[in-house]
């Protein structure tokens, strides 16, 4: 994104207050407590003390009292404060001296010796505008005594700052500042809404750490920098702001001093007899983003390291004797019949699937809906194949490429109507494909043009495949015709089962007649049970993924990541038509015409004939040829299986 003009409305961060033992558990910012209450309906304590030097904490205190907490509000200011919120005890003109408690905060002591019992202490020491981006854009800062903070100074061409980042403390100031910011960029000033919220009345009474304070007063909570550490830096003559930072590590933790830098600068100013702007600021670092707590849990995260996704019919498969393995992040049946003779079980499943009819749980296949007025243009851009010419009710196989032209995923695209498609991507790439669709939607199309919904976990997909697949389905009342004229290969139809809508696609990964039936995940079990019961008349077999891999290899169907690698281009797989014929732009198009992509000796995926009686070729084995007296690789095996139907090994490479 390369904008001509930018309005920075990056907000402000609440500062802490200085007092002894201010790092006890149970002490948090007032803004955080308000967020817990309003976003998550969590009350952070029952007997709460709120300490402040500005108006913003009054809203927090009132909200907590309304939620049922016993709240005492301690305001450093004696005059000019708002009225106490309902059911809130207000103590004016007093500051926190210390907090006490063994395992967590249990009480606080004020500067006049008064003790208040509490199970949660909320502190609000004012607001520090988030002006990092403005500073990185070479913007100069100006100190505001009124706000006790650095604010944006002289304007930078093409950049305006609005809201709390510009020092606004009330909603009316936010609206007025937004209008001014837009106008400063030469834009028409829009009509502004009226503010009905509370207005700030008393300003702020700065509460900086005081040199020589008793007790341990933390300034930087992450790096454990205290008032005494800054005093020591001053005695050692590390009074430059950059020296102070590196001597004490003030502001060098993961938050880059978002809450600690300004109190530290004010303390150094007090020690050395300077003003805060005379002390100056450090270089502003790049912006930060929230980090999930699980990221801090270390390496021993167990299953959370890579959570396994589960099929909606897992319990049914286990009851049928399925042996589960992880494939692409999903726990799926590898085969049925236990581990006693896995090789024989897999071969039996593959052979019987060719002879009559097989059932397979394909719920892991991607089902990502692409909807909107530009959905056709969107899928055209995302796929190597032209997809906008696909008629409603039909399917088309295609590749997705990365920006460097490499085959990223393959699968079937279903067109339900003029503005609605379903991307059926490979099971292991669902999350990655979804992320890629969202990225390109935001970059080139926008939410109003295309909407994306990942329905993979919402629906189960049950596959019926084999010579008798149609006969088996015709025993069920699905409410649609299965005649080839009405539902030909690569078509999709809609019916019902038990009052629920089902979507039936005539696509095949086995090479035989196949029907993929998609139904709500929580309604799949009765359908599966009836398919198995009705299938007994056709000697139905339930197959796992290992048998499916044999069936697809017999037909020469590929698996992305197994028969391809990080250098495979579509014409390496024998699919050169779109590269030669498509004139419109699509992801990866430019990379298909580089010198490397166009050389004539690129490796090609082919089927490998193995004589009957020979053992299957080892996957990864190289075919070699003696050239000029030296053995040179001519390629390698990507997939290799013993075919029970053909009676000999089959391989791709």
Image (cartoon, rainbow, N blue to C red):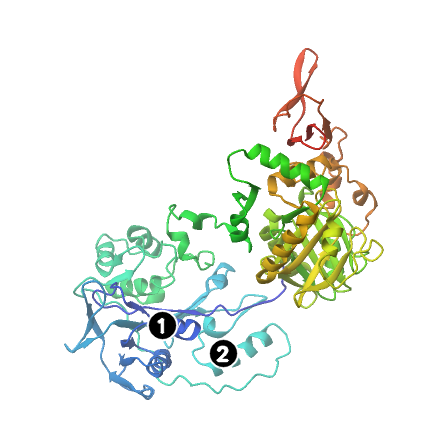
Relative placement, left or right, of 170 versus 334 is: left
How far from the left and from the top, in percent, is residue 21? 21, 64
Q: Residue at x 41, y 54 (%)?
A: 294
User: In the rendering, at what x and y percent does residue 530 appear?
Assistant: 64, 56
Give the image quarter of residue 511: top right
Q: Of callouts 1 and 2, which one flags the residue occurring earlier in the amino acid sequence?
A: 1
Rendered residue at 23%/65% (across/down): 104
Residue 587 can be seen, yes or no? no
> Which one is nearer the viewer's eye here, 379 or 276?
379
Specify the farthest residue to the left. 113
- Given this view, does label 1 or label 2 mark the residue nearer the observer? 1
Q: CA distance from mark 1 to mark 2?
A: 23 Å
- 601 in relation to 442, above or below: above
Left or right of residue 60: residue 73:
left
Count neighbours of disc 1 (C-alpha within 10 A) and say few if under 14, some if 14 to 19, many if 20 or more. Answer: many
Q: Nearer the viewer, residue 68 or 48?
A: 68
Furthest residue to the front? 537
Q: Which mark is residue 174?
A: 2
Residue 60 point in image, percent of width and height: 36, 78
Residue 398 shows up from this direction? yes
Q: Quadrant of residue 31?
A: bottom left
In the current view of this chain or complex, which residue is farthest to the top?
Answer: 629
Residue at 66% over, 13% down: 630
Task: Quarter of the image for the C terminus: give it.
Answer: top right
């Amino acid at each position: 994104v390369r904008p001509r003009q930018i309005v920075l409305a990056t907000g402000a961060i609440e500062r802490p207050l200085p007092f002894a033992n201010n790092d006890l558990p149970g002490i948090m910012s007032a803004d955080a407590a308000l967020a817990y209450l309003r976003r998550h309906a969590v009350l952070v304590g029952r007997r709460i003390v709120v300490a402040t030097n500005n108006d913003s904490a009054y809203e927090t205190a009132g909200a907590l009292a309304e939620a049922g907490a016993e709240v005492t509000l301690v305001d450093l200011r004696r005059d000019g404060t708002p009225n106490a919120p309902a059911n809130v005890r207000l103590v004016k003109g007093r500051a926190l001296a210390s907090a006490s408690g063994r395992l967590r905060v249990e009480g606080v002591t004020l500067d006049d010796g008064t003790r208040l019992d509490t199970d949660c202490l909320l502190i609000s020491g004012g607001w520090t505008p988030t002006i990092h981006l403005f500073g990185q854009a070479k913007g100069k800062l100006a100190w505001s005594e009124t706000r006790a903070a650095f604010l944006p100074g002289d304007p930078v061409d093409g950049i305006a700052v609005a809201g709390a980042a510009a020092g606004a403390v009330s909603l009316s100031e936010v609206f007025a500042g937004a209008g001014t910011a837009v106008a400063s960029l030469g834009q028409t000033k829009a009509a502004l809404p009226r503010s009905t919220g509370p207005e700030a009345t008393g300003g702020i009474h700065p509460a900086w750490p005081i040199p020589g304070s008793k007790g341990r007063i933390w300034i930087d909570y992450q790096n454990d920098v205290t008032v005494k550490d800054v005093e020591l830096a001053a005695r050692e003559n590390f009074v430059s702001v950059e020296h102070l930072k590196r001597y004490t590590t003030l502001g060098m933790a993961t938050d880059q001093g978002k809450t600690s830098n300004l109190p530290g600068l004010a303390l150094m100013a007090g020690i050395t007899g300077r003003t805060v702007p005379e002390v100056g600021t450090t270089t502003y670092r790049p912006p930060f983003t929230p980090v999930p707590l699980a990221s801090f849990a270390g390496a021993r995260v167990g299953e959370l390291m890579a959570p396994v996704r589960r099929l909606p019919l897992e319990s049914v498969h286990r009851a049928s004797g399925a042996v589960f393995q992880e494939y692409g992040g999903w726990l799926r049946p590898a085969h049925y019949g236990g581990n006693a003779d896995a090789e024989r079980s897999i071969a039996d499943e593959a052979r019987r699937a060719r002879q009559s009819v097989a059932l397979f749980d394909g719920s892991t296949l991607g089902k990502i809906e692409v909807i909107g007025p530009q959905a056709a243009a969107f899928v055209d851009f995302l796929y190597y194949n032209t997809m906008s010419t696909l008629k409603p009710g039909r399917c088309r196989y295609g590749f997705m490429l990365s920006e460097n032209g490499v085959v990223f995923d393959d699968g079937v695209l279903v067109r339900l109507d003029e503005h609605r498609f379903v991307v059926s991507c490979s099971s292991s790439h669902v999350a990655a494909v979804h992320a890629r669709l969202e990225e390109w939607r935001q970059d080139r199309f926008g939410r109003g043009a295309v909407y994306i919904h990942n329905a993979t976990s919402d629906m189960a997909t049950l596959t019926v495949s084999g010579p008798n697949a149609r006969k088996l389905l015709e025993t069920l009342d699905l409410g649609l015709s299965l005649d080839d004229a009405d539902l030909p290969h690569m078509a999709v139809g809609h019916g019902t089962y038990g009052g629920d809508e089902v979507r039936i696609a005539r696509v095949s990964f086995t090479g035989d007649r196949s029907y993929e039936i998609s139904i709500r995940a929580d309604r799949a079990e009765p359908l599966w049970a009836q398919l198995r019961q009705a299938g007994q008349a056709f000697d139905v077999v339930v197959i796992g993924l290992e048998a499916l891999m044999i069936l697809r290899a017999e037909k020469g169907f590929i698996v992305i990541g197994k028969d391809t690698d990080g250098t495979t281009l579509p014409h390496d797989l024998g699919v050169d038509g779109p590269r030669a014929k498509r004139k419109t732009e699509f992801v990866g198009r430019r990379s298909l015409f580089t010198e490397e992509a166009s050389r004539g000796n690129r490796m090609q995926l082919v089927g490998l004939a193995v004589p009957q009686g020979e053992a299957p070729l080892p996957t990864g084995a190289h075919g070699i040829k003696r050239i000029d007296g030296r053995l040179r690789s001519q390629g390698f095996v990507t997939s290799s299986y013993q075919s029970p139907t053909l009676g000999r090994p089959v391989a791709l490479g």
